[in-house]
Amino acid sequence: MCRNIKPLFNFEPPASEEEIRQAAMQFVRKISGFNKPSKANEAAFLAAVDEIAAASARLLRSLETHTAPKDRAEEAARKRARSAQRFVSH
């Protein structure tokens, strides 16, 4: 999985349209190999981002869970702590 694409399901507050679009953009960048497409490929690139974002939004809306939503702030703090521990100078 692309490291920059974060799980978006079962968070409070729910994923925003912008977060879903950013994940779609990262996915298209990864599979196309383009960070920024040429003018010739720009329309196809952006169309793919739109389609993947729409499919992702539908998926997130349709998923069900019986677990309580994770708190975004708590998850971010946990991730920062893990990262700090991993990159501590020895």
Image (cartoon, rainbow, N blue to C red):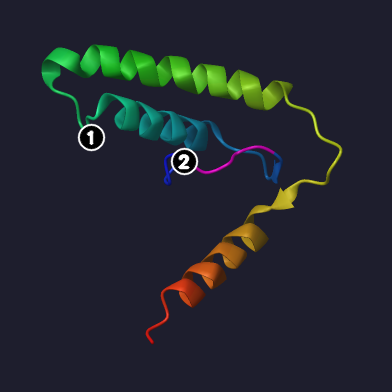
Residue 35 higher or lower than 67, as above or below: above
The numbered dot on residue 5 is: 2
Crowdedness of circle 2 by 10 Å Cα count: few (<14), some, many (20+)? some
Quadrant that contains the C terminus? bottom left
Point out the stretch of residues depicted in magenta: 5-9
Q: Name the side, left or right, on which 3 lies relative to 11.
A: left
The quadrant holding residue 67 is top right
Residue farthest toward the left in the current orientation of the protein: 39
Residue at horizontal 46 percent and vertical 38 percent from the top? 1
Residue type pointed to by label 2:
Ile
Percent across and percent down for residue 36 are 20, 31
Q: Name the side, left or right, on which 33 lies relative to 86.
A: left
Residue type pointed to by label 1:
Asn
Percent across and percent down for residue 61 are 69, 24
Residue that mark 1 sits on: 35
Residue at horizontal 58 percent and vertical 41 percent from the top? 7
Residue farthest toward the front in the current orientation of the protein: 90
Q: How many discs mark residues in the rendered view?
A: 2
Q: Main secondary structure of the magenta part?
A: loop
Q: Is residue 67 magenta?
A: no
